[in-house]
Image: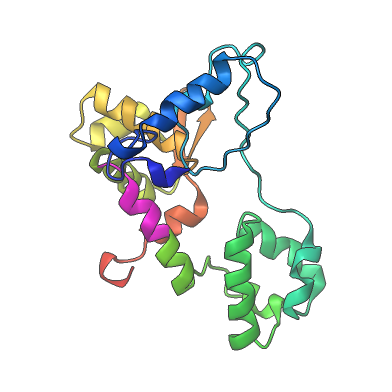
Amino acid sequence: MQEIFIPGQFAGQYQTQHKDYKKFFNLLTEISHQSTVIVISQEQSPEMSSLDDELYPAKCLELDGLANPDMLKPFGLTDPESWVKLMQRYQGHPLYLKEIAHLIKKVFRGKVAEFLTENSLMLTEGMNAQLSEVFQRLSPVEQNIALELSKAETSMSREQLKTALSLSSTELIQGLDSLQRRYILQSREMESTSFNLSPIFQAYLQIPRDNR
């Protein structure tokens, strides 16, 4: 669904030629019907959420990564005792695991344990290409926030981000909200709320720009 939104702006804003989808999604929540519609998206639209989850007919479920290491069996990898660690490193993401499995098969002769001794989050060309598409969809405000967070070794609070970036309070809050609706920003409850990027997206942003 993210393809009907405007790239380069905050998440969930419909392209002009696709604005009828907004009416369609609103109607799904307002009229009586017996249908079930499943929408898959990397961005949330305003119609996907509500203040009252108990009564709102649309439910927004965030997909977790896969946890069953059996998914790696078709790739001919060795060291099955290391598969869980490999899946955790790549957050159980099916596409990333497929890419990495092919890399391990070609470069490490299928030896997962040997690959893991590299102790780094390697990204393939295919992963870089997909993550580049995600980054290009961000608004300039979101890109600034993401790049600043990618430099940090720990999560950053809103006040720390405000100090580091030349953004107004409104821009910063809108940017943080939009990044969370794209599922690439995570928030943590500490003394004050702090934010960090998903590890794979952070690893992508830490690559020198000329090499991405």
- Residue 191 shows in the view: no
Which residue is painted at 54% across and 13% down in the image? 51
115 or 107: nearer the viewer: 107
Specify how the rendered protein is coloured.
rainbow
Q: Quadrant of residue 62?
A: top right
Indicate whether 118 appears above or below 133: below
Residue 148 lies within the magenta run: no
Magenta stretch: give its range.
131-139
Residue 134 lies within the magenta run: yes
Which residue is painted at 47% across and 70% down in the image? 126
Which residue is painted at 32% across and 35% down in the image? 10
- On screen, residue 49 versus residue 165, left or right, reads right
182 or 203: nearer the viewer: 182
Indicate whether 22 appears above or below 18: above
- On screen, residue 72 versus residue 202, left or right, reads right
Residue 83: x and y, percent?
A: 75, 67
Query: What kind of secondary structure does the magenta stretch mostly adopt?
Result: helix
- Residue 102 shows in the view: yes
Residue 144: x and y, percent?
A: 26, 44
Which residue is painted at 58% across and 14% down in the image? 31
Residue 53: x and y, percent?
A: 62, 16
